[in-house]
Image: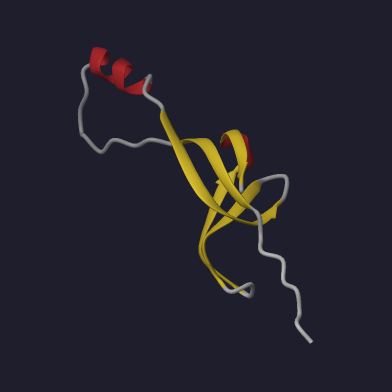
Amino acid sequence: MKVKTTLPKLYEITWRDSVCNNSPWFSVEDALVWAKQEAIMQTVGYFVHEDKHTLTLAQSLYGSKSFGGLWGIPIGCIIKRKRLK
């Protein structure tokens, strides 16, 4: 008897990441320019779990039983989500 398995849904998530700069000193003008930058990321992965704090995707799928490369994205950082076919 053949067992039917359902693969997890694949999503593209657009989200705002935090940024960091390890330069020791900035002029006030340069600091203001740096502070206004945004890091908009796009991540594609298989849906693993979502709760009120985090959306978890997997970068890899082994059959239908194992995930690899888990990626947690804070819910408040998500700008857009798109289900891929």
Colour convention of the picture: secondary structure
Does residue 84 appear to the left or right of 34 in the view shown? right
In this rendering, the answer to whether 12 lies above or below 67 is: above
Residue 75 screen position, x and y as percent: 63, 40
Residue 20 pos. (x, y %): 34, 37
Count numbered badges in the picture: 0
- Rendering quarter of residue 37: top left
Residue 9 location in percent, x, y? 65, 54
Residue extending farthest front:
1
In the image shown, does 52 or 40 lie closer to the viewer? 40
In the image, 20 versus 54, the foreground residue is: 54
Quadrant of res 1: bottom right
Seen in the image, is 16 located left or right of residue 46? left
- Residue shown at 26% from the left, 14% from the top: 28
Residue 74 versus residue 79: which sits nearer the camera?
Answer: 79
User: Which residue is outermost to the top?
Assistant: 29
Q: Is residue 22 above or below residue 28?
A: below
Q: Position of residue 44 (x, y in %)?
A: 51, 48
Residue 62 vertical placement versus 69 (above, below): below
Question: Which residue is drawn at the image coordinates 20% and 34% (left, top)?
Answer: 24
In the rendered image of this protein, does residue 77 appear above or below residue 67? Answer: above
Farthest-out residue, bottom: 1
